[in-house]
């Protein structure tokens, strides 16, 4: 039975960091890649990375338009809320076994919340980093919602463990980019 792995790409930077993961899942005969692309990854102003993804030969399973035209704190919160609503619906249809999310953007929080409430195993890549900005709080919240952790550095792995995550669910693998 194929395991369904849903990778959510919501920005150009996230595609760059998750491309090696997407490639590994896409080429594994025991895994079924479900690729969701949305937010600024669909936006022409940000380079519309969805076109790059398709040119790279990866099939996009679903697109989710959740990005508001401004980037104020209120619009970031609204984008997160829209993401929760729309991603929950997509996850219900796709029924993934795993959802993979990366880093710490506010749209990523939507992915984490939607997967968590639907009891889908959430895989967080690049958690545990310390930045001192709102991104750090978002990243740590995503960590607490996640089941499996793939931090980029040993220090980040130790930070995740200090947040209370089980050591046997934290895998220091380096940056996937």
Image (tube, rainbow, N blue to C red):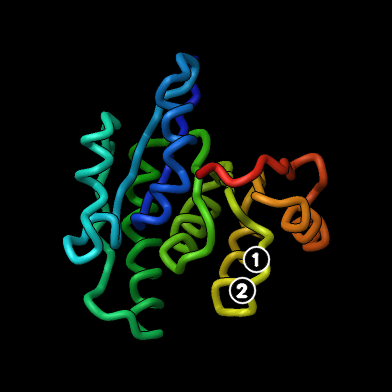
- The residue sitting at 41% across, 64% down in the picture is 107
Q: Is residue 51 above or below residue 58?
A: below
Q: Residue at x 26, y 29 (%)?
A: 57
Left or right of 40? Residue 145 is right
Residue at 28 percent across and 55 percent down: it is: 41
Label ID, residue 137 = 2
Q: Position of residue 123 (x, y in %)?
A: 58, 44
Q: Nearer the viewer, residue 168 or 47?
A: 47
Q: Position of residue 43 (x, y in %)?
A: 21, 61
Q: Please state if 16 lies on the left or on the right of 58 as rendered.
A: right
Q: Is residue 42 above or below residue 172?
A: below
- How many numbered marks, from 0 up? 2
Does 150 sit above or below residue 103? Answer: above
Q: Is residue 116 left or right of residue 105?
A: right
Disc 1 vs disc 2: Cβ atoms closer than 8 Å? yes
Q: Residue furthest left?
A: 44
Q: Quadrant of residue 53?
A: top left
| Location of residue 100 with respect to 157 vertically, above or below | above
Mark 2 Cα-neighbour bin, 10 Å: few <14, some 14–19, many ≥20:
some
Q: Secondary structure at mark 1?
A: helix
Q: Which residue was labeled with disc 1?
A: 140
């Amino acid at each position: 039975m194929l395991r369904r792995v849903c990778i959510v790409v919501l920005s150009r930077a996230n595609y760059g960091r998750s491309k090696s993961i997407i490639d590994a899942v896409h080429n594994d005969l025991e895994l079924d890649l479900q690729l969701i692309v949305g937010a600024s990854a669909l936006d022409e102003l940000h380079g519309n990375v969805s076109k790059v993804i398709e040119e790279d030969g990866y099939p996009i399973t679903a697109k989710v338009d959740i990005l508001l035209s401004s980037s104020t704190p209120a619009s970031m919160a609204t984008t997160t809320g829209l993401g929760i609503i729309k991603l929950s619906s997509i996850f219900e249809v796709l029924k993934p076994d795993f959802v993979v999310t990366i880093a710490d953007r506010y749209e990523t929080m939507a992915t984490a919340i939607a997967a968590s409430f639907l009891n889908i195993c959430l895989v967080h890549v690049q958690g545990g980093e310390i930045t001192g900005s709102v991104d750090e709080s978002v990243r740590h919240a995503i960590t607490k919602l996640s089941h499996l952790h793939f931090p980029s550095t040993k220090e980040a792995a130790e930070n995740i463990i200090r947040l209370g995550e089980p050591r046997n669910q934290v895998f220091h693998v380096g940056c996937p980019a």
